[in-house]
């Protein structure tokens, strides 16, 4: 896909991250999110309230990484043509 704003390009580090991120299947992030919610519930049931809150807060981060992963796969990272 051609860059819609050729005056703005990703930096070297962002391009390297996108290159590696695109290799990860998108459902990994969904399963990681569900896993963190399940672990949080288990911790809550066993009385580890603070740890349960900490682990439960990972779910949105995993989902956001999944969105980023999907965007990188669909749009690709900036390339010079």
Image: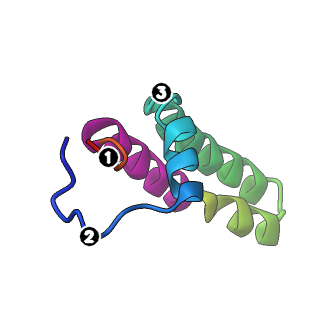
Q: Residues within 10 Å of mark 3 (few under 14, many from 20)?
A: few
Task: Please name whichever residue, 18 or 44, is drawn nearer the observer in this view of the structure.
Answer: 18
Residue 68 percent location from the top left of the image? 41, 51
Residue at 23% x, 62% y is: 6
Judged left or right of residue 65, residue 45 is right
Q: Is residue 62 above or below residue 31?
A: below
Rendered location of residue 25, percent (x, y): 47, 27
Graded by Cα atoms within 10 Å as few (under 14), some (14 to 19) or many (20 or more), the crowding at tag 1 reads few
Is 59 left, or right, of 50 in this rendering?
Answer: left
Name the residue at 34% across, 50% down: 78
Q: CA distance from mark 1 to mark 2?
A: 11 Å
Is there a contact, CB below 8 Å, between mark 2 and mark 3?
no
Which label was assigned to residue 80? 1
- The magenta stretch spans which residues? 59-75
The residue at which mark 3 appears reads as: 25
- The numbered mark at residue 7 is 2
Dot 1 or dot 2, earlier in sequence: 2
- Is 35 colored magenta in this rendering? no
Q: Secondary structure at mark 1?
A: loop
User: Which residue is pictured at 26% across the width and 43% down the height?
Assistant: 75
In which quarter of the view is residue 79 placed? top left
Q: Quadrant of the C terminus?
A: top left
Left/right placement of residue 24 relative to residue 78 reads right
Label 2 CA crowd tier, 10 Å (few <14, some 14–19, many 20+): few
């Amino acid at each position: 896909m051609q860059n819609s704003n050729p005056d703005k390009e990703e930096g070297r580090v962002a391009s390297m991250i996108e290159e590696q991120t695109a290799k990860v299947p998108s459902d990994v992030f969904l399963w990681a999110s569900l896993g963190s919610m399940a672990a949080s519930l288990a911790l809550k049931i066993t009385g580890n309230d603070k740890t349960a809150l900490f682990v439960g807060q990972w779910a949105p981060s995993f989902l956001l990484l999944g969105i980023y992963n999907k965007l990188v796969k669909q749009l690709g990272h900036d390339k010079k043509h």
